[in-house]
Amino acid sequence: MQKLLVTGGAGFIGSNFVHYVMSNTDRRVTVLDKLTYAGNLESLKDLPGDRFEFVRGDVTDAALVDALVGEHDVVVHYAAESHNDNSLHDPRPFLDTNIIGTYTLIEAARKHNKRFHHISTDEVYGDLELDDPERFTESTPYNPSSPYSSTKAGSDLLVRAWVRSFGLQATISNCSNNYGPYQHVEKFIPRQITNVIDGIRPKLYGKGENVRDWIHANDHSSAVLTIIDQGKIGETYLIGADGEKNNKEVVELILEHLGQPSDAYDHVVDRPGHDMRYAIDSTKLRNELGWTPQYSNFDAGIEDTIRWYRENESWWRPQKAATEAKYKEQGQ
């Protein structure tokens, strides 16, 4: 029975991956998570104890990482500082986790000759113009624009260098914006959903024209598992579900699903250096590995996500007040 070490598995995308693996395979999973504000043990409730273990710890802790990597067959590296606003306020944690943490893990994977999969983001490619017909591909040059995306770009390059220089058995995936269960209320979609539930008007950066390529977290999880099982060592695969929507469209859709007027939102000052458009071309993943997304209808996916937040208020409520107070300080 294959044993997976999942870093950052108490976070949003990592916890969805753990649930997906538990539901669709017989693999065993150990989660290594520091449990910063973005990690939540409640996201890992009720998993089978004979196949699941949780370890609280930091990916920069070389001794702990070495011991855990040695005991597992595959390392799936989700752990990252990932919020753009936070990276603009205090970049240092992004350097520690995203650069030093990745270095620590790939050194352990190299030492023990373990399979390594690195989770990254489409934000390493910078952004596209709104009227640009192009989409990101595996050959798009890196052009990160924030401390977050630049540290993720740096971590990608470390993995690539370790593959070439040391024979690290690694693959990389760069995914578009995720949505779905277990996402912290600081993030765009759950913030708007929980605001409306609480009778608060949603907040929209600038004019709301910024376009993101949305993918349901379950589709991201299925893609990662496909790459782990079938991907070619040293290759990068882009994960996307053709879900381009601008932020204004997303907010209006959420309002409509929650029975509110589609214009019942407020504009707030835009984020510095806010990327305009992300768009993923996942042709390589689909053609070479046969992956297809299951949640191709964004409207239905949003409806399912709203239902989850309505039914799991006890999960997100403890985070909400502090998150909104922080945004209020920033005028957002």
Image (cartoon, grey):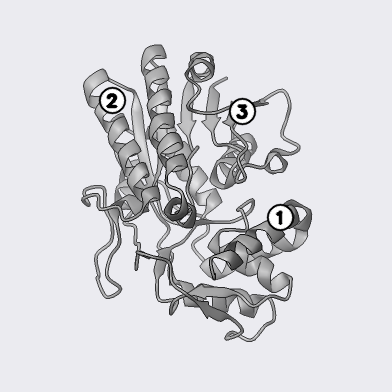
SS class, disc 1:
helix
Give residue 162's mark.
Answer: 2
Amino acid beneath label 1: Trp
Instruction: Quickly name the residue at label 1.
Output: 316
Mark 3–mark 2 distance (CA, rounded to whole Å): 30 Å
Mark 1–mark 3 distance (CA, rounded to whole Å): 30 Å
Provide residue 10's location: percent of width, then percent of height.
Answer: 62, 39
Quarter of the N terminus within the rendering:
top right
Provide residue 326's location: percent of width, then percent of height.
Answer: 60, 60
Disc 3 or 2, which lies upstream in sequence? 3
Whether residue 229 appears in this view of the structure is: no
3 and 2 marks in contact (CB < 8 Å): no
Mark 2–mark 1 distance (CA, rounded to whole Å): 39 Å
Give residue 26's mark.
Answer: 3
Q: Residues within 10 Å of mark 2 (few under 14, many from 20)?
A: some
Mark in the foreground, 3 or 2? 2
